[in-house]
Image (cartoon, grey):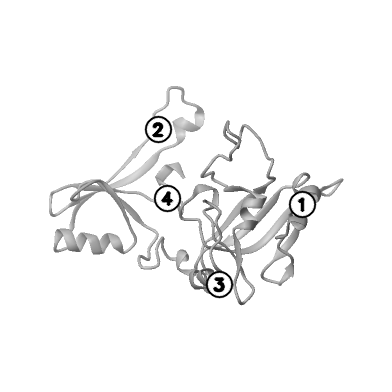
Amino acid sequence: CLYDPVSAEKAARAMAPGEGGLVWHAQIVPDNYADPKHTLKDGSLKPRRPLPQVRASDFFSALARTDDGRWVFGGVLNGWPALTTLELRSITFTVRRLRVGKRVQRLFDAATGTGKVPRTPDELAELHDKILTKSSVRVTLRAPSWSGHGWAADAPGHVWWFNSQGPGEPRVLYGLRMLRTLREEAGPEPLAVRVHMFGHRYAKVREGVKDRLTYHAAILIEWSHRKYCSVVELAWLNGIGGDG
């Protein structure tokens, strides 16, 4: 199940206390939430959304409390396999007020130790009746500290490589694993002998003004081993090139 909790002991081992680690946000929706824009025909939430979404009872039932009082989410958030074992840092909701606009209020704040995490059926029912039916509720979660430096504890570096020229099936390598794998399979590290920069526009049937002005640039590297070339490009963190 996506929302089975982990034991308090496992949560404490995976999420050491302290700072650091990537911060994630997720939208909490009512258990009876149904919106064609965000739900499938069978009523389930659309998986792997840019802003993860999760039903209230699923999220709060997947929390475990460590001996030092921290709350750790042990499920798989909105079907994203990497978003698991995350420390709950805050629960907030927005309130609309005349002439003032939106105001953010906190149900729980781990930094100050204030508020309460709803857990019992009565507390969840109150959350649904008084807040979820009227306001937008968001949780802030922290990943393990090593996530601030890479996608795995033993592979620092937010860089990845889709390698289709190696032995076996195409694969994705990341962080320092890229170098370790290259050394194991190819021997001495190759040298870059030529570098070419190129830019292109996106192919569209109907181009707008923005499309005519937008170019995407990348770098092509020729290696000394002459087996293949590599294309290198910058991207937003956790994004893919120009696709974000």
Tell me if residue 183 can be seen: yes
Element on which disc 4 rests:
loop
Q: Measured from the top left, where is residue 13 in percent x and y?
A: 49, 73
Count the labels in the image.
4
Marks 1,3: beta carbons within 8 A: no
Which residue shows up at 78% across the image and 45% down it? 134
The answer to whether mark 4 and mark 3 are in CB contact below 8 A is: no
Q: Viewer-nearest of labels 4 and 1?
A: 1
Sequence-wise, the earlier of marks 3 and 2 is 3
Type of the residue with mark 1: Ala
| Residue designated by label 4 | 235
User: Spatial distance from mark 4 to mark 1, Cα to Cα?
Assistant: 42 Å
Residue 186 quadrant: bottom left
Q: Mark 4 or mark 2: name the one nearer the start of the chain.
A: 2
Q: Give me the C-alpha separation between circle 4 and circle 2.
A: 16 Å
Label 3, secondary structure: give it: loop
